[in-house]
Image (tube, grey):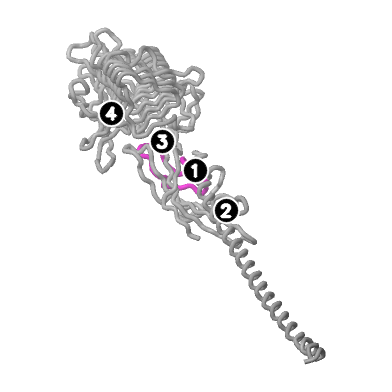
Amino acid sequence: MNVHDTFRATRGEEGFGLIASILVMTVISVLGAALLTSGMSDLAASDNYRSAKQAFYAADSGVQQSLIDFVSDSTWAPTMVDASTLPIVLKINFPAVVSINNQAINMAQQGGNPVAKFYDFGPTVPFASASYDRELFLPPIAFNQANGKGSKVWVVMPTRAVGTAGLNGNARQRIQADARVLLFRISVWDNAIFAGGGQGGNEINGNVQVRGSVHIVGDPLNPTTINWGGGAVMLNNYLGAADNDNFAADAWRLPALPTRLIDNELVETLDAEFRLKHGNLDIGGTVSLGTPNQTGTPEKEQLDGFYMDGQVTATGSAAVHADYSGEYDIREDVTFPDLGDPYVDPGTGAAYATQRSYLMTNSVLLPYKKIDGNTPAFVVDDGLGNRVEWNPTTGELSVDGIARVEGNLELGDKGGVSGVNRIAYTGTGTMYATHDINIHWDVVPQGEYLNTLGNARHNLGLIADHRLSIASGPGDSWIKVFAAIYGGDEIRVKKQSRIAGSLVSTTFDLGSNVPRIFQVPKLAGMLPPGMPGAEPLLYVSRAEVVNWTHLR
């Protein structure tokens, strides 16, 4: 082969190299396009996933915001719930408009009743790169008692939220949950003892017993210290009420306690709780606030709750036994009901400058300041529903409406007629003294306390503008009183007195003897007329989510 033959062969291969290069470039282009398409698809999928997540978190935040709205504002609760009596109930005549935390909900009506369905709950709310819209189901779908006497209830209101995110809102997620809201009817009379300032006199010691709740609001400028020593106890039941050192033969007058199912056991309970605001607690000796729960017993032993914002100092074997404990748990301002506060007549709606002026205007004046065996029989009746009748021979007293004494009122006297040493009352009424009330005899209902069957009403209120004292006279002992008791400045309970009802005062003094206070749970829902603090506060205690569902 010569040189020219070689040259011709090389030129012949040039066309093949060009074709190969084009093929390689084509393959690379196809692969690049495929990779680009795949990358764009992955990017779109990632964007959709991110948008879906944003929408989900927005929807979940909408549900959580509903819980915040429920507990941030308690004013909506009275529009739905009737708390005038116990147990509290859902209102039958539901309002057309409900406002929750300034979010107005307009409810459709049919035949005067609200249409049960989901309603818009507030405007669209931006949330990060998304937003949410909410709905609330009204009226509530469930209304369940949370304690025995019905002062606490769980209200179940389904709430749902739709989260929106992504370009043009293409990602939408829905979440629905049942919001369970705990409503708490707070009344100064739903306690064995309610005090505005706290404890007066010496420490509580000896064998003092308080059966039921204690609520002391104290003074932020002068915090109180509650001193309990010796063998004083706070109990959550009526165990031993019929013992000779308690009510003995009068124990049958106590209304039966409500019951609750606790750990599959049906037990009687006072639903007792201890609350102290603006103060400290000092307990010593063998003091026991509640006792350890025991299985197989018909009573609840531990307190339901123990809440205070001060310090607890415990010495000796003193202890607190409660289901729950923590800081003072009521965000609303619970105050002592002073007779100098403005007052509105619940029956007529008439406004009075003070409750004192209401009591003075709407009461009948008693002809005597002492009611005992030496007091002549009398009947006073103003024809306006205020009536009092006294029979010194039998010791029977009938009180309806409001009766007043200007000055001090003395109930009983050890120097009275032989054989009569108690006042047995009937009716539904209140006795008001413009200064003090001193009780020296038993003051008991003629039948079961607070019985409202037929005409056998036994419901007495005692109001002392300044001090109410029980068993403070020489020779006074073993006095039993069934009543709603109010002392504007102080309540003193001495000796071996036994009280069934509630004590409400600025300060209380239980001395160093062995008085025993038995709260009567139904009293808070059926107070005699004119009692201070009769209007309860309905408070949203907490809210939580149950039955959470992601609807997509």
Q: Residue at x 56, y 54 (%)?
A: 133
The reply to whether callout 3 and callout 4 are in contact (CB within 8 Å) is: no
Helix, strand or loop under label 3: strand
Q: Residue at x 40, y 20 (%)?
A: 505
Please tell me which of labels 1 and 4 falls first in the chain.
1
Q: Quick one: SS at disc 2?
A: strand
Q: Amino acid at mark 4?
A: Thr
Residue 291's label in the rendered image is 4
Mark 2 closeness class: few <14, some 14–19, many ≥20 residues within 10 Å: many
Q: Position of residue 354 (x, y in %)?
A: 49, 23
For marks 2 and 4, give the one nearer the viewer. Answer: 4
Q: Which residue is mark 1?
A: 70
The mark that comes first in sequence, 2 or 3, is: 2
Res. 185 mark = 3
* Amino acid on which disc 2 is placed: Tyr
Quadrant in which residue 473 is drawn: top left
Q: Is residue 1 left or right of residue 453?
A: right
For disc 2, the marked residue is 132
Task: Kindly state the secondary structure of the residue where label 4 is placed.
Answer: loop
As drawn, the residue found furthest toward the front would be: 1
Name the residue rendered at 55%, 47% in the picture.
104
Which quarter of the rendering shows the N terminus? bottom right
How many angstroms separate mark 3 from mark 1 (CA)? 16 Å
Direction from residue 47 to residue 11 in the image, left or right: right
Q: Which residues are magenta?
A: 75-98
